[in-house]
Image (cartoon, grey):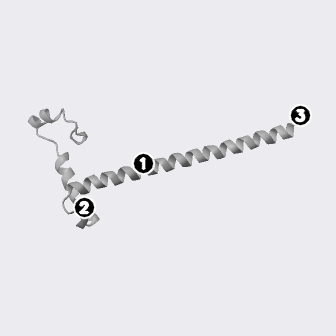
Amino acid sequence: MRKTKTQKRLSVKEQIRQLENKRKQLIQKEKSEERKARTKRLIERGVIAESLIANADTLTNEQFKAVLVEALNVVLDKPEPAEAESVSGSLNPLME
């Protein structure tokens, strides 16, 4: 039996609805994967930071931030012109 135009239209609408739902699911999955990757990165970097700061577990968040800001300010200060030549080949992205 042949499908009528109305049945064909309904079938196409159903396919569109299914594809839209599939698209939404894929977007949700992508966002979830991005959140998991960000969470993993934040945890790993936090572990690295804590391993480099003495008594980090006893510091408040504000104190921890202050230590990081102070350390980064020292690292990010521009070197003298004579030092810049020796540092320019550095692999450290903070020094570029």
For image coordinates 28% across by 64% down, the residue present is: 61
Question: Dot 1, how many residues are within 10 Å of its Cα: few (below 14), some (14-19), or many (20+)?
Answer: few
Asked which quadrant contains residue 16, the reply is: top right
For image coordinates 48% across by 47% down, the residue present is: 33
Marks 2 and 3 in Cβ contact (< 8 Å)? no
Residue 27, horizontal then vertical, whole percent: 56, 46
Query: Does 40 sit above or below residue 66?
Result: above
Amino acid at the residue labelled 1? Ala
The first of marks 1 and 2 along the sequence is: 1
Residue bearing the label numbered 2: 64
Residue bearing the label numbered 1: 37
Distance CA(mark 2)–CA(mark 3): 72 Å
Residue 73, horizontal then vertical, whole percent: 19, 51
Q: Locate the C terminus by quadrant.
A: top left
SS for dot 1:
helix
Residue 34, horizontal then vertical, whole percent: 46, 47
Q: Locate the N terminus by quadrant.
A: top right
The first of marks 1 and 3 along the sequence is: 3
Distance CA(mark 1)–CA(mark 2): 24 Å
Asked which quadrant contains residue 6, the reply is: top right
